Image (cartoon, rainbow, N blue to C red):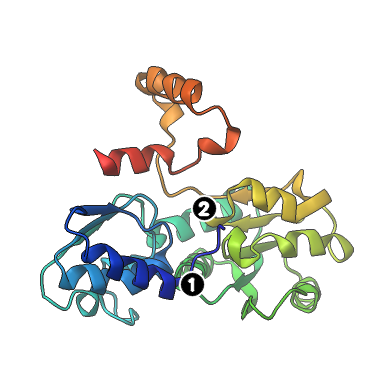
Amino acid sequence: NGVHDPQKGAQNFTDMVGNTKILGVVGPFNSNVARATIPVANRASLVMISPANTNECLTQDFPYCDPKPAALRPTGKNNYFRIAAPDTVQGPAMADFAIDTLKATKIAIWSDNETFGKGVADNFGKRVTAKGGMVVVRQDFDVKSTNDFRPFLQRAKDAGAQAIYAGATSATKGCIPRAQMKSIFTTDIPYLGPDGIGDTQCIKDAGDNATTNLYFTNAAAEAAQDPANKALIDDFKAKFTQKEDLGAYTFPGYDCAK
């Protein structure tokens, strides 16, 4: 249903490690689920390779990581790999774009307070500050109990925010605030986010405010930018005809399976 669930993910992996026909797993898609499932697979020596996980602490040992990558691998051996760029790249990339291209130096940040969302928001905010910008408002939400982001948006406007950054996914209401900005901000104020909002659900949730100044980063390479991939992409589109069949992580998933 598009909503990630770490507990369900851990249960799925518990079921998979008991199936001798499963030798490896492509996934999971979400970093929060990865954090819950890596230890389960590690104890069973089940290899995982994700096309989409971006939280840096899954593989990189920074002082702020909790848990540390080693704690996710109780056997002491590595079973987990990923090919997406980590949030230490994705967050700063959007900060560079916001300041250098959009000329926004005062930015308000919110996150869904999950492994991916909070992590990418933290990395974005650190880069904004390092480049001489200001994080004028920062708030982490419990999105399960929050539908009204207007108090946050009003504080952002009062603080002089020139852009809003969402550390979230469409499944965690990442673009609901974009729609609610319409009653508070003018339409020229950009709404920024990570790859988690790069989908049709975001466009639907943003409503009338989706047509301009809505930006997201993508932690995967764009397959269509390489002419050598044209035949592969054309063959894929011929077989899978729905627009939603081809997403940012379709071909990274293909690479993982190879």
x then y, percent, for residue 236: 44, 25
Question: At x 43% / y 61%, what residue is drawn?
Answer: 30
Question: At x 62% / y 72%, what residue is drawn?
Answer: 110
Is residue 177 depicted above or below 90 in this figure?
A: below
x then y, percent, for residue 23: 18, 53
Report whether residue 188 is seen.
no
Q: Secondary structure at mark 1?
A: helix
Look at the image and tell me in which quarter the N terminus lies: bottom right
Mark 1 residue type:
Asp
Indicate left or right for 60 with 96 as reference. Answer: left
Mark 2 residue type:
Asp
Question: At x 45% / y 56%, what residue is drawn?
Answer: 90
Q: Nearer the viewer, residue 7 or 126?
A: 7
Judging by the rendered image, the residue that carries numbered circle 1 is 122
Q: Nearer the viewer, residue 106 or 242?
A: 242
Which label belongs to residue 93? none
Indicate left or right for 225 with 42 as reference. Answer: right
x then y, percent, for residue 129: 52, 70
Is disc 2 surrounded by few (<14), some (14 to 19) or many (20+) residues within 10 Å?
A: many
Report whether residue 205 is seen.
yes
Q: Earlier in the sequence, mark 1 or mark 2?
A: 1
Which label belongs to residue 195? 2
